[in-house]
Image: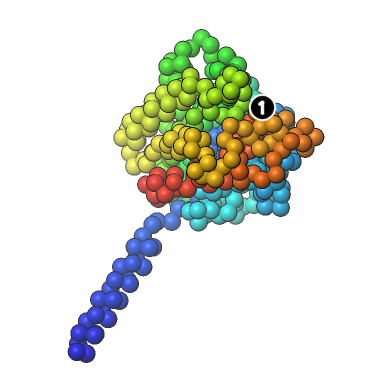
Amino acid sequence: MQMAVNFLYIIFLHLVTVVVLQSNATPEVPALIVFGDSIVDPGNNNGLKSLAKCNFPPYGRDFKGQSATGRFSNGKIPTDIIASQVGIKEYLPAYLDPELRDEDLLTGVSFASGGAGFDNMTAKVASAYTLWDQLQMFEEYKRKLESVAGIERAAEIVKDSVYIIVAGSNDIMVTYFISNLRSNYDIPSYVDYIVQAASSFIKNLYNLGVRKIGIAGVPPLGCVPMVRTIRGGITRECVEIYNQASVLLNRELSAELTRLAQELPSSQIIYLDVYNILHDLIMNSSHYGFEEATRGCCGTGKVEATLLCNEELSTLTCQDTSKYLFWDAFHPTERAYELLVTPLVKNYLPILF
């Protein structure tokens, strides 16, 4: 009898050991590093003479300390949520934050700039930093990282970190449709232009030592409040041609990323599908507890964003952001971002880890 008890005890210890080992099996991700547009810009545009910034109330009203940091939302943005959920840190700071500390470099920063796109013309129209400007910042970051961590450790951090790129929405929505600045292209040819620019950017990152990259597709742009207002008619319906362009870009981008992952040795390059998650949130908003999915919380919610979303001009701003899917006429609320990001972290990012 005693032998049977001892045997069961040994089996129990073995199972506990296996569980502990499995729970610790995920390799450490030293840092999260981000490039892109306003969706993931935590304040890099604050010092620019640009309309594409929001370092003033009511932006940030649900952020820590009710601080308008330059994040294009009422609170956290996707990269804050990702960094927190994977255990890196609570907030991902802007690289150009004047209060950025050396320790922040070790765990990652965001170079993203509101108004940017894969097409350089997109950022120039918004007086924002292009993705290539952001790439130059990354090269500067690498030099700073070497001075903080040493050359060998810095190289390890660069290689082992996870990189997120969020761009393309402004190219389609603003540069192509709203401003007609690329009217010499039809939609398929402009999509191809964007995809090739994205591919070139990724190759440049790879040549700088980057290996683990997640690239977000574009959301259903035809259902963004501003687009509903200017192109959705009296009833402000989703605009199908915008959504069709989004789907085409996502399909071509995903195919190119698959090709690049095979072409670039030791790389892990994945496509992050945000279109279907956000489309589901919009179409089934009441299921997720939202009462409004066609207008933003700020002002009337139909056109207000950046400078038009402010305390003086936005007396109609909602009281309870948790009921709204969108914060302003372009950007989701923190709660919507949490519902969007959580399945991405669960289903996609472990591939990079």
Q: Residue 324: percent from the left, percent from the top?
A: 61, 40
**320 and 334: which one is in front?**
320
* Numbered disc 1: secondary structure: loop
Q: Residue 96: percent from the left, percent from the top?
A: 65, 41
Q: Which residue corresponds to mark 1?
A: 303
Question: Residue placed at 63% from the left, 35% from the top?
Answer: 296
Q: Residue 49: percent from the left, percent from the top?
A: 72, 29
20 left or right, relative to 327: left
Q: Residue 203: percent from the left, percent from the top?
A: 42, 32
Answer above or below: position of 13 versus 24.
below
**304 and 15: which one is in front?**
304
Look at the image and tell me in which quarter the N terminus lies.
bottom left
**142 and 286: which one is in front?**
286
243 left or right, relative to 179: left
**Residue lying at the far right of the rendered structure:** 312
Question: Residue placed at 67% from the left, 52% from the top?
Answer: 64
Report crowding for label 1: few under 14, some 14 to 19, many 20 or more residues within 10 A (C-alpha).
many
Q: Quadrant of residue 4?
A: bottom left
